[in-house]
Image: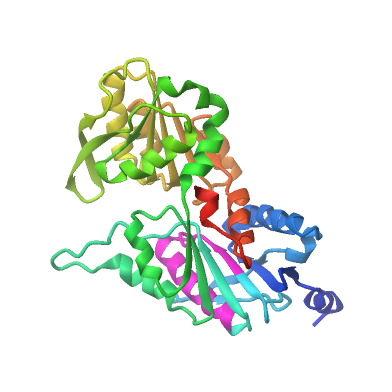
Amino acid sequence: MTKTAAAKSAKRPYEYYGTPISLVTIRELLPLAERLAKRLCEAVSVDPSELEPILFDMKFFADGELMSRKPIDALVRETRVIYLDCPRFPTLNDGIMNTVLTLDAIAGAGARNITHIPLYLPYARQDKRKPGEPLSWIRVAKMLKHATPRLDRLIALELHTEQHEGAFDELQFNQVRGHRIFAEHFAAAYRHRANEVIVVSPDAGGVERAKKFADKLFPDGHLKVAHTEKERPADNVAEVVSYSGPEDIAGKIVFIYDDMIDTGGTIAGAAALLKKRGAQKVIAVAMHGLFNKTAIADMQRSGVDEIVVSESVPRTPEWLATHAPLVTQVPLDEILAKVILEQRPGGSVSKIFL
């Protein structure tokens, strides 16, 4: 080991309430991890160099096997490791495998315990048993949950349904919901315009989620939350067929609020229907912007004026510049830091989202 590496290994780790902490992430999330580390260090008035994000090496063998390896000079032994992750890179299924192997590698490197923060959890929509099909969500959740006994905490972002929390019942679990993040983002421009705004869920099942957003954005009251109804003639295909909510939407600003935007078909269908009924402006809001196939073009063509998502699925600065001003990505470092810092003796994560 070189003198530089030895000095790096001997460096005192970041501590919070007496617990030494390390931060591990993937290359695609490094900018977010650096901002998160800065906030965590500022909270205890230490230099950000005490919590430098660690990138595990990802390697592919000739036959496609994947390996995850800790850098030789990185210190995780006897620390609580925060693993900031998005299992979608380089592909979704490789990303899941890399997550499982990295969790095991972190434990093998001597971590005391692990807090896993997967910003997006795939396979969430395959959560109902159908004849001849696997219950994919449960299988994937179990792969993650049982990757290592050192994993004892999981922080998830906007699960597809509340029932999904049950898949992690053996872990200390927190869910970061989007209603506070997005309400704060839109507050300056829209909080004083409650009578001009209608919040719409793209289906009946998401009304409660949309109502939480409306309540947070307009704490003094708002118009009734609406929803559209859709039919699915095939997998990954949605046709919006009806609208239920305030009848007079002519000239109104409409927020379509959902947990994720995949191919954008549901959002596009809802936007077209709402614009046909006279909506002045349609803003699509979701925690997870997957943007598969021609999602962005389809939504824009159907009347969506603005798309706002979080950085749970990271994008490069070049991608964001190309899609501005239509697409805006809201940062997550502040809310994640608050959740992590509340995981202390006497802390309360739930109060953050009240």
Q: Quadrant of residue 37?
A: bottom right
Question: At which x and y percent is residue 108?
Answer: 58, 84
- Residue 75 is at least partly visible in this image: yes
Asked whether residue 88 is drawn in magenta, I would say yes
- Residue 67 is at least partly visible in this image: no
| Above or below 208: residue 306 | above
Asked whether residue 332 is drawn in magenta, I would say no
Depth check: give the residue in front, 191 or 79.
191
At a point 62% along the width and 72% down the height, the residue shown is 81
Question: At which x and y percent is residue 64?
Answer: 44, 73
Residue lying at the far right in this picture: please name it: 3
Magenta segment boundaries in residue numbering? 82-107
| Above or below 95: residue 151 | below
At a point 31% along the width and 17% down the height, the residue shown is 278
| Above or below 146: residue 285 | above
Tally of marks:
0
Depth check: give the residue in front, 204 or 139.
204
Q: In the shown orientation, is residue 314 left or right of residue 167?
A: right
Question: At which x and y percent is residue 14?
Answer: 74, 68
| Above or below 313: residue 14 | below
At a point 13% along the width and 66% down the height, the residue shown is 131
Q: In the shown orientation, is residue 228 left or right of residue 98?
A: left
At a point 43% along the width and 26% down the height, the residue shown is 305
Instruction: Report the predominant secondary structure element of the magenta stretch.
Output: helix
Question: At which x and y percent is residue 68?
Answer: 55, 75
Q: Quadrant of the N terminus?
A: bottom right
